[in-house]
Amino acid sequence: MACRYKTEENRNNDSIWNSKTRQLRVDCVGASKGLFIGLIFLTATLLCLVLFFIFTPQPQYHRLGLFLADAAHCTLLVVSTFAMFYGVYRFLAIYQLNAEYILIYYKIFGGIILTLFKIS
């Protein structure tokens, strides 16, 4: 379910192509699903952040607040890592590239993963 680009060559009766202004319409099927999942993760992260600041000052719930913060952080790192690799997989499935470009993309995502898990 990739993005489909409507151009002059593959236009049909239900597409809108204006030859004077040269508009290009894109139908992205999975965009709304990705936005919804992103909003769910944002809400869960904000909830864990609020609970961290509520639980941390109280001595009996201090460890629970730290556990929630660490669990939310690890979950976001793992999910974002899998999402990056899935995006690379879908990108390479759509565009047939040669080996040089594939290695460049993996190098970029390797650098991103290095900065995600770097402890300073």
Image (cartoon, rainbow, N blue to C red):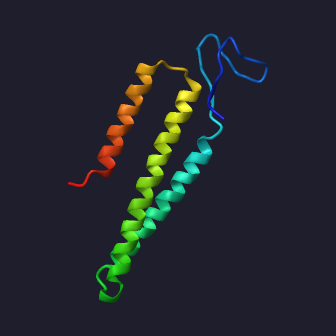
Q: Nearer the viewer, residue 16 or 63?
A: 63
Identify the residue at the far right of this view: 13
* Residue 51: x %, y % from top left: 40, 74
Where 80 falls versus 30 (above or below)? below
Where 76 falls versus 20 (above or below)? below
Is residue 41 shown left or right of residue 112?
Answer: right
For the point 60% across and 21% down, which residue is it? 24
Identify the residue at the far left of this view: 120
Where 2 falls versus 73 (above or below)? above
The mark total stands at 0
Identify the residue at the far front of this view: 99
For the point 46% across and 42% down, which residue is it? 84
Where 102 falls versus 83 (above or below)? above
The quadrant of the picture occupied by the N terminus is: top right
* Residue 111: x %, y % from top left: 32, 38
* Residue 31: x %, y % from top left: 59, 41
For the point 42% across and 64% down, which residue is it? 72
* Residue 86: x %, y % from top left: 53, 41
Is residue 90 shown left or right of residue 99?
Answer: right
The quadrant of the picture occupied by the C terminus is: bottom left
Is residue 55 shown left or right of residue 39?
Answer: left
Where residue 119 sits, quadrant-wise, is bottom left
Where residue 94 sits, quadrant-wise, is top right
Q: Nearer the viewer, residue 102 or 15?
A: 102
For the point 31% across and 44% down, which residue is it? 114
